Image (cartoon, helix red, strand yellow):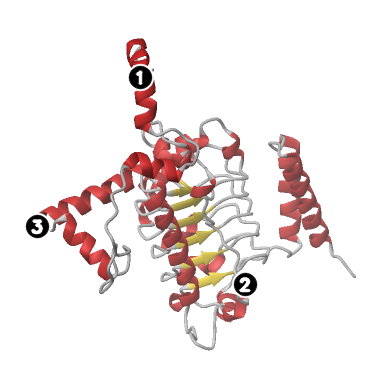
Amino acid sequence: MFINKGQQESYNLQSVQHARKAKKVVPSKFESRLADAALRQAAEGGYLISPSRSFLLERCQTAKTPNQSLRDIEYIHLSHFHIRTLGHIQSCRHLRVCILNNNYLTRFNALENCPHLVRLDLHSNQITKLPDEGFWREMKSLQILNLHDNGIGKLDDIQSLCVCVNLVALTLYDTPLSLKTNYRHHTVNSIWSLKALDHHVIGDDEIIEDALFSKRFMTMNPRLWVDLCPKQTEPLDERTIESEMKVVKKILFDVNRILVHGSPVVVIQRWVRGHICRKALNISYDQVQERLRKLNFVVQETPSGSQVDEVNLDYDTYLKNRRPGSKTPSAATTLRNETPMTKQQNK
């Protein structure tokens, strides 16, 4: 197979990246210059592309949603296309889902012209610096942002994300930034709207200072795991904006479902709200139990039409039958409180 010069330089760049990931070290200045030179030569050889208008209309057009102009495009999936710059993607004003992973992008500031973005996937690129606050302030609909496996290394870049008011899920693992001390603590407390970071829902002990919870609610425990970048099995040519929005809703649903059961604060708030609501509606506990019995949530004690003999069973007998061989509380108390005079009288 014939390999041109641009492809050879790109292969050399990929080998450098794979070696860097295997060693898990920060690249040196020599490696950075070597990677930049390889990218420059690959771009000059025509191996790296910039999406044109005709290219986008051809790739993003489906039988169900024929696109007449770039403004009609709502969904773009161009992974592994060796894209160096965004090109005419910035003209897609109504873009809602943009997936550009595994390319050679270094900047994406031009996406500020796409304020309707809900999900932006840019993992496995060459991004080293994030846009400023002015860019993220326009992303009022953005909820899921995938930036893992990039060259982002400064905490100041994370600070600019605080103005992205609806951002719920963020991935930044496999970056130089994720290797820094207190990276997760700094990120969680900088972006207040964030609910999940790097495949784990944010725990209450990461937000509440000096909070002590059980292992069930500890940070990054298996109960809080969530997939923020799921792999899709559906063929690429059959994916539409409807199917992609279903993926977005599925991710957000999983995050909220885990948060409801994995956050002590949310659990307490739910119970308090239920108590206040029942009190305002003058609903007693017996009414709640009766309603649950009708819904088969509570097993009825006696079936209708049957005769059950009453049995008087005290707690000591129940505990003794429940745990054979163990001493009942009353027996243990009697033995502990028995005095020498009482023993002689019993004899």
Image coordinates of residue 99 in percent, x first then y, are: 55, 64
Q: Is disc 3 in contact with disc 2, using a CB cutoff of under 8 Å?
A: no
Q: Which residue lies under the disc numbered 3?
A: 282
Residue furthest to the front in view is 347
In terms of secondary structure, where does tag 3 sit?
loop
The disc, 2 or 1, on the residue closer to the chain's N-terminal end is 2
Residue 112 vs residue 199, the one in the foreground: 199
Residue ID at (36%, 13%): 344
The disc, 1 or 3, on the residue closer to the chain's N-terminal end is 3
Q: CA distance from mark 1 to mark 3?
A: 56 Å
Q: Quadrant of the N terminus?
A: bottom right
Residue 203 in sight from this viewpoint? no
Residue furthest to the top in view is 341
Q: Which residue lies under the disc numbered 2?
A: 233
Q: Nearer the viewer, mark 3 or mark 2?
A: 3
Q: Is residue 278 left or right of residue 129?
A: left
